[in-house]
Image (cartoon, rainbow, N blue to C red):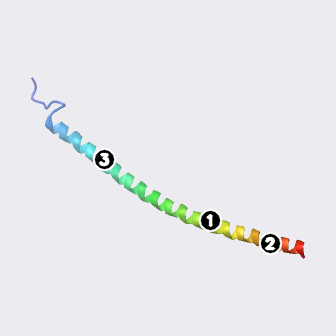
């Protein structure tokens, strides 16, 4: 038998665990940043949607007003 540590020694297991923990921490940081960006994009999309709904409502009101004027002109 040799005096070298085996592959599955507690020291190697601890080093492997430490590496994996570092990878998990890095992944958490990446996911946190991605989540922040997605929340920001979502807020932008919601604001754009609200603006488009307002624009659509204004256009609908204008079309209705034009139709009403046409009806009034046809009756007059």
Q: Which residue is mark 2?
A: 68
Q: Is residue 72 left or right of residue 49?
A: right
Q: Earlier in the sequence, mark 1 or mark 2?
A: 1
Which residue is at 80% across, 69% downward? 67
Circle 3: element type: helix
Label 1 vs label 2, nearer the camera:
2
- Rendering coords of residue 10 (x, y %): 14, 37
Q: Earlier in the sequence, mark 3 or mark 1?
A: 3
The residue sitting at the top extreme is 1
Q: Tell me what residue is drawn at x 60 percent, y 67 percent.
A: 51
- Residue identified by numbered label 1: 53
Tell us which disc is closer to us: 3 or 2. 2
**Mark 2 neighbour density, 10 Å: few (under 14) some (14–19) many (20 or more):** few
Q: Position of residue 18 (x, y in %)?
A: 23, 44
**Residue in front for this viewpoint, 33 or 70:** 70
Looking at the picture, tell me which residue is in the foreground, 22 or 3.
22
> What numbered label is drawn on residue 24?
3
Residue at point 89%, 73% (across, down)? 75
Task: Find the distance from the CA under tag 3 to the CA under tag 2.
Answer: 65 Å
């Amino acid at each position: 038998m040799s005096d070298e540590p085996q592959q599955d020694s507690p020291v190697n297991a601890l080093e492997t665990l430490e590496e994996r923990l570092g990878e998990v921490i890095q992944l958490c940081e990446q996911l946190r940043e991605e989540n922040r960006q997605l929340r920001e994009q979502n807020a932008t999309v919601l604001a754009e949607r609200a603006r488009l709904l307002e624009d659509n409502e204004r256009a609908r009101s204008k079309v209705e007003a034009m139709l009403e004027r046409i009806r009034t002109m046809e009756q007059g």
